[in-house]
Amino acid sequence: MKLAKLFQMQTELDAYIQRNRKEQTDVFREKGLALLVELGELANETRCFKFWSTKGPSERAIIIEEYVDSIHFILSLGIERGLTNIKTWPQSDDTMKEKNVTEVFMSTYEAIVTFLNNPTEHHYRIIWQWYDALAFHLQFSNDSIIEAYIAKNEENYERQKRGY
């Protein structure tokens, strides 16, 4: 999947948000925590770890919306660190896809924290690989991810206009 369009859309949204903020501060760590929270919300909607419950996952539309909430923050973190030269989504390897979804979530958390503490392109690419593995397990196509991202991007603009 090509990332240039998504980076551009996220750059524009970030600039819009920044123009409307009262103070101009570095928000890298805040965006990192937001990404971890969004990943947790995604896991919660899949219910993959809730061995004690017989209730199934949320509707697919809710799960993909949580997934792309994370994508917004991954893109934004890359923009913050000048890592927008990544043109295509780094693909996961078979060992990543072979893990069960709970392990994929945990490895994704670990990759995010590693990047936040050492924000290199190498660590950034690993986050994208784990998100690819999540997409594989959640059976999201590239087209469905892009479509959901665009819809959520538009919603984020509307939220900003309403003072969200």
Image (tube, grey):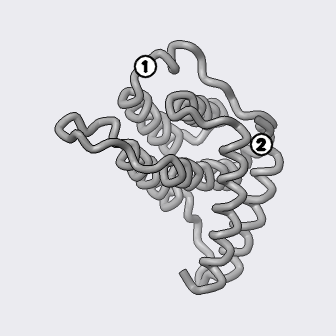
Task: Identify the secondary structure beneath mark 2.
Answer: loop
Relative to 77, residue 27 above or below: below
User: Residues at badges 2 and 1 in contact (C-beta under 8 Å)?
Assistant: no
Q: Residue furthest left?
A: 52
Q: Is residue 146 left or right of residue 55?
A: right
Name the amino acid type tagged 2: Leu
Residue 153 spot, x, y in % from top left: 68, 63
Task: Identify the secondary structure beneath mark 1.
Answer: loop
Residue 65 disc label? none
Q: Earlier in the sequence, mark 2 or mark 1?
A: 2
Look at the image and tell me in which quarter the C terminus lies. Answer: bottom right
Residue 109 figure quarter: top left
Look at the image and tell me in which quarter the N terminus lies. Answer: top right
Name the amino acid type tagged 1: Lys
Relative to 135, residue 42 above or below: below
Residue 3 disc label? 2
User: Could you tell me which residue is drawn at 56 percent across and 32 percent down?
Assistant: 139
Q: CA distance from mark 2 to mark 1?
A: 25 Å
Residue 163 spot, x, y in % from top left: 57, 85
Q: Residues within 10 Å of mark 2 (few under 14, many from 20)?
A: some
How many circles with numbers are drawn on the protein? 2
Q: Is residue 97 left or right of residue 121?
A: left
User: Could you tell me which residue is drawn at 60 percent across and 29 percent down?
Assistant: 129
Q: Residues within 10 Å of mark 1 (few under 14, many from 20)?
A: some
User: Could you tell me which residue is drawn at 63 percent across and 30 percent down?
Assistant: 122
Residue that numbered label 1 is attached to: 99
Observer-side mark, 2 or 1, equals 1
User: Could you tell me which residue is drawn at 69 percent across and 29 percent down?
Assistant: 90
Residue 102 spot, x, y in % from top left: 36, 31
Residue 46 spot, x, y in % from top left: 39, 42
